[in-house]
Image (cartoon, helix red, strand yellow):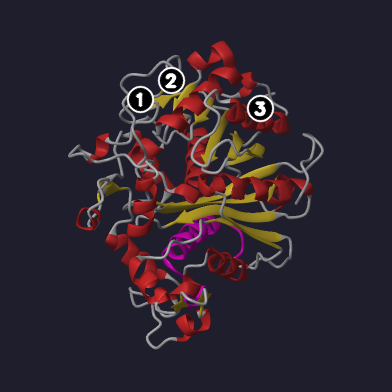
């Protein structure tokens, strides 16, 4: 693990390219405009009602987009599962926009992909069960993998290999010549932020010059939806308009809406970017990843663990809380998460929390789990570029803990020099990133 480097001792890390796919949209600017207009990506899922789950809405990838992205994969991509297809598009888009050559001629590049391990769908579990000897307590894995017709239920040959997140990591590294460091993060809902943060650490330390960092997730499936419903994390549809279901920080919030998507950033040392004349979009000014184990599905309700993470990111950046102009909140719209995050914001920012704009992108994007931190980092970069804050949908009235926060509910022009972007995951995986203007954050 690369050690934390005291602020000022390492290389400055900049963003030179971004890429993103969500819903029916396949580029970051189109998504930013869509969200700025107060529109959502959350709709009824074509199969959720058929499956009989009470949360029959999601921010899933449009079927036509799936087909287009799959057909656009180059032969060099090799076999990729659904999340890998999304990752490929977002990563290639970010790379092309960065202006880097198609392949690096150095070993000082890396790929950092966030993607949680895939859950097996019912058809696959049924096939696997046939190879279990219950009396002996033995699984004949070779027999399962080598069985006749071992394709997946969707016809993908050797699907068990395609859906492994590491497959996409290796494919991207090989294609772009960025195999100096390869990491695949599965840190629950914080994974996307942690992938970006890890890449930042490697570049800041001087170990890498370039990194492709982001996340991809394709979990609007029966197994994933059922699992999150059973732990009480998903908001039930209950006949409501899909656009009104995700309600971060609102007193009537009752769970998140699951989503799919992918987002990537190209990170470089400032020296490397400037030497090749790259356009610098933003800087990664600070990062902290903090692990706690209060409870599998929530953190300390007083926000102490989240506050520790935010303060650590500020310390890493060498910034005071006054330097932050905007909070891109984790904001899942679950009772526990929003309570913890709101309490932490009051703790870290004190009276200033009432005047510090907070945005919950998941109100319109849904929660794409490992990808969410990467997607929100991309949107934070665009907020810095456009000096515009995105709205939080469906926030009408706070509760006693979320009261006192300046939750943005309409597109808002604002002077933004530094954004704190939070990602807090199940199992106590907490992450905070600080994105700042291309010239760096004010101290």
Mark-to-mark CA distance, 2 and 3: 20 Å
Q: 413 above or below 100?
A: above
Q: What stretch of residues is rendered in magenta? A: 74-101
Find numbered disc 1 in the image and state the secondary structure of the residue it sits on: loop
Query: Within 10 angstroms of label 1, few (less than 14), some, or many (20 or more) residues?
Result: many
Q: Which residue is mark 2?
A: 402
Q: Is residue 64 located in the magenta-colored stretch of the structure? A: no
Q: Which mark is residue 387?
A: none
Q: Is residue 75 located in the magenta-colored stretch of the structure? A: yes
| Quadrant in which residue 359 is drawn | top left
Find numbered disc 3 in the image and state the secondary structure of the residue it sits on: helix
Query: Within 10 angstroms of label 3, few (less than 14), some, or many (20 or more) residues?
Result: many
Residues under numbered marks 2 and 3 in contact, where contact means CB atoms less than 8 Å apart: no
Furthest residue toward front:
135
The quadrant of the rendering that contains the C terminus is top right
Write the residue at 27% across / 45% down.
55
Furthest residue toward right:
9
Write the residue at 31% across / 39% down.
235
Q: Which mark is residue 311?
A: 3
Q: Which residue is mark 1?
A: 250
Residues under numbered marks 1 and 2 in contact, where contact means CB atoms less than 8 Å apart: yes
């Amino acid at each position: 693990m690369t050690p934390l480097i005291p602020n000022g001792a390492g290389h400055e890390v900049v963003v030179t390219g971004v890429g993103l796919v969500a819903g029916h949209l396949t580029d970051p600017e189109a998504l930013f405009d869509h969200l700025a207009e107060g529109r959502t990506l959350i709709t009824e899922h074509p199969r959720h009602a058929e499956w009989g789950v009470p949360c029959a809405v999601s921010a899933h990838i449009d079927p036509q987009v799936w087909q287009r992205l799959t057909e656009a994969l180059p032969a060099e991509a090799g076999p990729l599962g659904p999340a890998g297809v999304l990752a490929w598009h977002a990563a290639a888009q970010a790379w092309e926009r960065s202006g880097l050559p198609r392949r690096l001629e150095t070993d000082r590049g890396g790929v950092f992909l966030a993607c949680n391990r895939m859950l097996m769908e019912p058809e696959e579990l049924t096939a696997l069960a046939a190879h279990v000897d219950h009396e002996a307590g033995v699984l004949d894995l070779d027999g399962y993998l080598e069985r006749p017709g071992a394709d997946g239920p969707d016809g993908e040959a050797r699907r068990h290999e395609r859906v492994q997140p590491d497959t996409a990591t290796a494919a991207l590294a090989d294609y772009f010549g960025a195999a100096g460091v390869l990491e695949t993060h599965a840190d629950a809902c914080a994974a996307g932020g942690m992938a970006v943060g890890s890449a930042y650490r490697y570049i800041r330390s001087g170990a890498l010059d370039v990194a492709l960092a982001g996340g991809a997730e394709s979990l609007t499936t029966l197994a994933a939806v059922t699992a999150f419903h059973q732990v009480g994390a998903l908001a039930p549809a209950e006949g409501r308009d899909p656009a009104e279901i995700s309600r971060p920080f609102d007193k009537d919030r009752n769970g998140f809406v699951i989503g799919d998507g992918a987002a990537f950033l190209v990170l470089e040392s400032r020296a490397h970017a400037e030497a090749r004349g790259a356009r610098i979009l933003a800087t990664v000014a600070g990062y902290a990843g903090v692990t706690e184990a209060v409870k599998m599905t929530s953190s300390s309700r007083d926000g102490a663990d989240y506050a520790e993470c935010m303060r650590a990111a500020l310390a890493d950046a060498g910034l005071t809380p006054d330097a932050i102009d905007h909070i891109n909140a984790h904001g899942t719209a679950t009772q526990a998460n929003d309570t913890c995050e709101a309490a932490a914001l009051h703790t870290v920012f004190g009276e200033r929390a009432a005047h510090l704009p907070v945005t919950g992108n998941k109100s319109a994007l849904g929660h794409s789990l490992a990808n969410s931190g990467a997607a929100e980092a991309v949107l934070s970069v665009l907020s810095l570029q456009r000096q515009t804050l995105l709205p939080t949908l469906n926030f009408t009235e706070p509760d006693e803990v979320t009261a006192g926060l300046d939750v943005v509910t309409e597109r808002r022009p604002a002077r933004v020099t530094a954004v704190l972007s939070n990602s807090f995951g199940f199992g106590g995986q907490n992450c905070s990133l600080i994105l700042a203007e291309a010239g760096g954050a004010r101290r």
